Every structure is written in structure tokens, then in C-alpha cells.
Image (cartoon, rainbow, N blue to C red):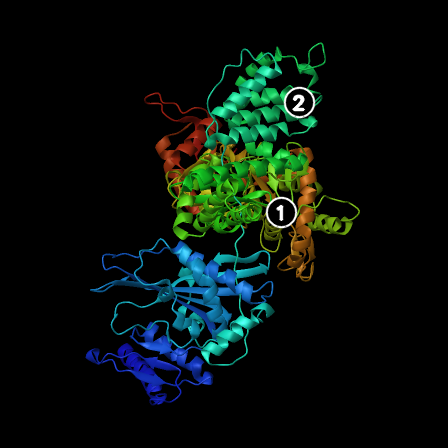
Amino acid sequence: MAQTMASISNSDFEQYLKNHTVGKGETYTHTRMGDPKQNIYPGSYNIPPEDHAEFIKKYFKYIFVNGKKEYLTEKQNIETGPLMVDIDLHYNKSVTERQHTEDHIVDAIMLYADKISSLLNITPGTNMEVFVMEKSDVNKLPEETKDGVHIIFGIQMHHALQVVLRDRVLPEFKEQWSGLPLTNSWEQVLDEGISKGYVNWQMYGSRKPEYQHQVYLIKSHFILSYIDREEGWMPEKQNIDSFSTEKNIAKLSAHYTKFPAFEMNPEVKELYEKALQNLGRSSAVKKSGTKKYKLKFAGKPGGGGSLNYSDIDSEETLDELLANLFEEISPCDYLIKETHQYTMCLPVNYYGPGSFDKWIRVGWALANTSPKLFLSWVKFSCQENCRNTLRGANGKFDWSCVKELYEQWCTFDTSNTDGLTNRSIMFWCKNDARAKYNEIRSETIDYFIEQTVQTATEHDIACVLYNMFKDDFVCVSIKNNVWYEYIDHRWYEIDSGTTLRLLISKDMFHVYNKKVQENVLKIQTFDQGDTKGDELRKYNNKLADICALLKRTNSKNNIMREARELFYDGKFLEKLDQNPYLLCFNNYVIDFKNNCHRKGQPDDYISKCTNIEYIKLDKLKHAKTIKELEEFMCQLFPEEDLRNYMWEHLASCLIGTNANQTFNIYKGSGRNGKSKLVELMGKGLGTYKGTVPISLITQKRNTIGSTSSEVAQLMGVRYAVMQEMSKGDRMNEGIMKEITGGDPITARALFKDSVTFIPQFKLVVATNVDFEETSNDDGTWRRLRYVDFKSKFLEKPYEDEIKFPRSECPYQYPLDKNLDDKFEAWAPILMSMLVERSYVAQGIVMDCKTVLANSDQHREKLDYFTEFAKDKITKKEGGKIKKTELLEIFKLWFTVTHGKGGPKGKEIIEFMDKRFGIYNNTKGNQGWHNVAIIYDEEEDTNNL
């Protein structure tokens, strides 16, 4: 039947084409390439615009559903069709593999987008799709090897303007792709016929008859977002695995007319009209978009070596030692001199009277950067107005203190010290001495640029890149090419350092190009034949060569490979999100150790964020929202001591310490608000809130390491909420104790290395049912905190005595159906309220009688042994119970009373030993004495 339906569908499409066949010389929209040897016959077809959607639908089913082959091409739409690019690559037949990479393609897209922006008046906020199609492999022919790329830009562009665009792109495109061993000319590589519109475009999914096994299919899909003329376009690569051919096939057609159109910039009109005349056509023009990338990056400190400090007895001696140090260091150790310069720019409040806290932190940062920087710490400390404890009788620095400073330096723990490094010093300098910071930064970059003029290797250029962007980027894995970027108080993982790579041909190019332009003006001031002018001209030619190199794909790839080592910080991930006293908001970082909010800095090593703004609490300004939140909490927890406990508990979730080592169980049947409380906390905590499966604490211990992705994602999380559990779930007390105990946890995320971290989260489960068979040991119940949600939120409170009798549901409140809408406004104020509480409580939660009583009640409910003793054991003088008898009766009792399963026999034996004395193991007299089993036929005379 399936074959019959397919044949009907196939004949349907073939008949559709036949119905739209046109003769030679007639207007056509599509053609079929033929090869009579393969029984493939050519044809011409005219599909009216109003029928195009139906045609595409039938074509999709024929090709992609029924798996048929076609050989169709489309005549291009001259006026309102999309911008289409055909890159045609020919190689010597010795080439057997694809030569270009995705980097080449991305560079080409960037280049086209940049040039488009010079032609069109793009509206800010515009999104432009870009589709990239390639064949699965190169075409290996007897005489040569062929390859190619098809690119569709999701904008309308008249073909006359496409010709202008091609002319602007071609010179730079040559530079970008110059590393490929091509045999065809650059004019042939960028198919001019496609730009002019007189060469047909191969339909998506069709193929040439001579290449039966080669068809262009989607390889990449980008969305470019236009910011403004200055910032240009920002790219976002889409997940190609989720790309739907059925939904997008119309966009991959030369006849698609729904892409956005933009007006041409006035200054381009003359070029456009000339191209229009050359095309021999006239038409109106509308235009399309472009893309730019803007990125930032950060690196790692250098350092090493040692010096003799014993004879530093004057500032002159110190300066001489520093001069020798700076003279001997290699260019790649220039970081030492740079760090020294930034340090010496710090203002007096870092080294003067009363500055100890800042002064010592400068020392820590220097020591963490390089042992050679001890000299810089001495130089920093010996300035006028130095700290009083370092002054001699003359009121100036006492040089005998150098020994004391060195002894202090040797005690610095360079493996910790809050992670302070040269970046910290740069950050302080940037904030407190901005002008000097900018001056040093400029000099540093100039130094490395000079090095590249002498030897323009990729490594030298990478050194320039490092010094330009080391504040904001770091490479954490050279092997896997993993990078992080620092933006707005925190670190973001980025794909393969792509944003840094883009800066090579953008910001870095502009630095070099600016120097070229400045030198051109200087050269014009020299007379012909002037030696200095000739030298400057040669120097400038080298700079110009580097400018060209910065635009080439292969060169950029090599620079990035060198940059990995310079930007590498092997301990970065160990530090990420490890400070339990820091909480990141969109605009500030909360420092609970110092009870303040401040701007974030790179060495905070934060990647998580609440994703909301921190608003300093103003009880007058925010009175309305504060009142609403307090009323919300009053309704959730009508009992005051429980409400106060929950305020402290929620506040403790902001700090990553876990002094209480508790596991809070939010307990209560439906309509009680517990899920809404969790949802509100999620709104406030952002990525600091994690969701984990209940299996985390119900699985067997021996599987927690092997299925640990759910554990690895808890790094840095402060509020971990487990999914609703099912009736019958039993807690693995050992795992629960491990997670809440504050001991290091080792876990491994999928496809990543194992990581060890100290849990910072407060563990919570919101549930309607109890854990089954929870161990009765004190170690378990010391951690459990049952928080009963006793309120009911109903449409008509107190009106349904059958379902919700007052005796069982004394706290009933009107259901607010718009509650979710309030969370957006509530979340920032709630977080501010919790921050204020955390400043005082510092993560400590005081137990309350209600919670402890609730927990005791639940413990008694799950205390099967006490229940068993009441039911089945009685005191009896001379009586005796043996282990075999006990275990048999207990198993039978548990099955009848609670169902299958039950606690281990070892646990009931331990209970009996505690309750009735240690088991007597004397031969012939084994048992617990003076007690007896109550059998069903006996009277129930349990005296316990």
C-alpha cells in the first residue's frame, strides 16, 4: 500500500510538471538539466507566482519524502529575489579532500554582510537569515577536482546591486581565501553569472545528471541581528540538527519574495544605475543587511625566576635591580613590566597610612602573578606617604623593612589568596586611575606591535591580540578549544573563541590600519629620496602586509592556535563559581563577606547569575511590593515561627555555605502554594537555582558517580529543588548525607572531564508524599526538616466542607489566578529583602519548634519498629525471643501492615538491642529475655 501511495504521489508531481511545460522561446521559471544517456530528458516549465507554494509542496514530497531524484534549476528573480552567492572552487586532480573550512565560510559571510551595510539603509533590530549549502564531498574528476559553496542571504536585492556588491567583495575575498590551491581565477570563483542573474540557480535538493551522488544540502544556518551602523551585525549560529527542510524549503528558492527589503543608500545610486544599464534592464531597488562582530577577551598571568634581595638598601639599588629585570625579560614576559606599571599607578589609599587591607591584597596579587614581582611590591611600598609601620625615624621608608617584607612575601599562599592576580591590579587601576591605566595599556600594545614589524610571525601577532583583549577572555582547554569571555560582571563560555577570532580582522586590523594611515601622512612630509622617509615607507609597508594578513582565513586560524597558549589558564574552571560569598546580579555582585554590593571583576570567577537587577531595598519606595510579599508569606505560613524560619531558610539560599547541613522537605497536598514559592525563588535566583531528579537521592550509591551529569550541573547552584517524588520512593540516606554534609563531590558531565567541588546548595524537595522506609538513625533525622504547607488556596474558601473541612484545613485563602504575573515585579524586591537578611544571618538558619515538631511527627509515622513493638511484643517474666522468630514475625507483620519490602533485618535487631537490652548469645540461652511475641490468637495485652 505504501508503494502504491508513493507511486501516486510521484506521478502526481511528474504530471504537475508536464502540465506546466513550455516550449522553446516561451517564458519559463524552471528548467530541467538532461542527459539522454541516463534517460533524463531536459525541459522548461512556467510556474506562476500564485502556484509556487503548491509547486514547492509537491516538490518537497517528491524529493525528501519519497526519495526521488530531480535535476531542476530556477530562473532568478531579478528585482525582488534573495541575494545568492555561488562559490566555485577548482583544484588540481591531486587534491582529494575539501580544502576550505567553516572559518572560510564564516569569513565570507562577514565580508558580504559588511559590504551590504555600505549599500543599504538597514533598520536597527533587523534579523537576517543566512543559509549555507555544500555537497558531502569534493567531485573527483579525471582532469580536475571540483568543490563549491552555495549561500543564500535572507534579504531582497536587485541583481544590479548584487553586481556592485560582488565588485566590492572580490578584492578582500581574494585575501581571505588566498591559502587555497585553486586552479581557476578569482573572477571564476565568485560566479558573476549568478550575481548578474542570467545563470539559473540549482533548486534545493536537485542535482546535476553527471553527479548523481552529489547534491547541495544545508550545512549551516545563521541569524544575523543588526544593532546599528557602528556595531553592525551580531551572528548567532543555529542548531542545524533541528533545521526543518519542510518549513524552510521555500526560503531556499530563488523565487522567495518574503525576505525583508531595504532602501539603497543614496551614495550608491550612481554605481547601481551604471550596473543596471550594463544588465540591460531597468527596475527599482530595495535592499538588505549586513553583519559585524564585536568581541572581547582575557588571558593568564606569566612569571617565574628569582633574584637576591638581601642588599636592597636604597631606592637607587632597587631601581637598578628593576632596570636589570626589565632589560632581561623576554617579550613574552613583558607582562611583568606591565603589571609593575599598573601597580605603580595605584593611588595612595592603596599604600599610604591606614591602607593595610588594600596594600596586602596588592602583595597577594603580585605574588600570584610572578615571584619576580617582589621588587615591584617593595617599590610600591616605599613611596612617599607609605604606611606608618614601614617608616623610619626620618618619616620615610625604612630600608631595613625589606627583609621583613620578603619574609612576609614568602608566607603568601599563592595557591589561594582569593585568586588575586595581575588582573586584579589592572582592575583596581582601571577603576581608580583610569587615565594612567589607558596610557599604560596603549604603550603595552604598541610594544608588541613593534615586535610584529620585526618578525611578523603568527605568535608575535598573537601576543598583540593577547595584550589587546586579555582583560576579557581566557582559554580553558587548548585541546578542546574551549574559551570564556568576561561580560558584565561574569564569564560566559563561547564557541571555540569565535568572537576573539572575529576581532582579529576587525578591532586588531583597525589598530594596525590606523598606524598605516598615520604613517602615510608622515611620509608625505619627507622629500623624495630622504633616507628617513624611505625607512618609514619600508616600515609602513610591513604594517600594511600585516593588515592584509589579518584578513586571511588561514592566517587567522594560525593566530588563534598560538593565542590558545597565551590566553590559557588551566586552573580557571577550578575557580569558577567557587566563592560561596558572592552572588551575581545583572548590575552588581553581592559580597556577603563584606556585606556590600559592588561591580563585578574578572577574578571573582563568576559564571552564574540571578538574571535580574539588584535593587537596593528602600522601605518607603518599595513599601507596596514589600507588603504584598509579606502577605504572600503570611498566607503560605500562617504560623509565625514557621514563617520566620522560612524567611531565614530562603535567605540562606543566597549564600553558598551550608552550616546547617539540612535537607528541607516542603510537604503538603495540592493547592498549598509550595510550587509557587519554588517558582518565585527560581525567578529571583536565575541560574543559581537548579532542578535535579529525585533519583539523585533514591538511587543506589554505586551509580551516583557513573550517572553524574545531574550532579555536575549543581556546581555553584545555591537552591537545588528535586522533582516531585512518587509514592514508594525510598531515600538513600548515605547519598543524602554526602550531598548535604559539605564534603567535596566528584562528578562528570557528559563528554567532559570529572570535576570535584564543594556543594553550595540548599537541598529541597517539594512533595505530596513521604519517603518510604526512611532510616530511623539520628544522623538522618538530624538533617531532615519537614516544612508543612498547611494553607489551601481555593476559588471559594471555607465553602466546601466535604473536600476541605475547616477542622483539617483551617487556613484557606482566595486563589489568585494572576499570581504568576506578579512574580516579575516581586522577584527583585524579594531578593533585596533576602540580601538584607543574609547580611545579618550569614547563611545560618535557626530551628523553630514547629519545624522540629513536624519532623518528629514524620519520624514517628515512619518508625516501623516502635509500631511493631506496640503491636507484637509484650513484657513477660521468663519470656524469650530468638532472632529467627523475631525476623519471621516482623516480616509477616510488615507485609500485612505496610505491604511488601520493609527495613533490613539488621535494623530491627539494632532496635531490639536498644529497647530490650543486648541480645544474649550464650549457648542454650540465646535471645532477648523477659519479652515475648504476641501472636494473633492471644489477647492483645501489650504493656508497652
Three-letter code for the amino acid on which mark 2 is drawn = Phe
Q: Is mark 2 on a helix, strand or loop?
A: helix
User: Residues at badges 1 and 2 in contact (C-beta under 8 Å)?
Assistant: no
Q: Which of marks 1 and 2 is nearer the N terminus?
A: 2
Coordinates of residue 865 in the picture (x, y in percent): 47, 36
**Which of the pair 911/657 is nearer the observer?**
657
Q: What element carries label 1?
A: loop
Horizontal relation, residue 10 to residue 769: left or right:
left
Coordinates of residue 275 in the picture (x, y in percent): 49, 74
Three-letter code for the amino acid on which mark 1 is drawn = Asn
Q: Where is the N terminus found, in terms of image quarters?
A: bottom left
Q: Locate residue 62: give its quadrant.
A: bottom left
Horizontal relation, residue 620 to residue 161: left or right:
right
Residue found 31% across the figure and 84% down from its top: 43
Coordinates of residue 583 in the picture (x, y in percent): 61, 40
Horizontal relation, residue 105 to residue 182: left or right:
right
Provide the residue designation for mark 2: 356
Above or below residue 616? Residue 169 is below
Residue found 47% across the figure and 70% down from its top: 162
**Which of the pair 22/113 is nearer the observer?**
113
Dot label at residue 471: none
Provide the residue designation for mark 1: 586
The answer to whether residue 697 shows anywhere in this view is no
Above or below residue 804? Residue 841 is above
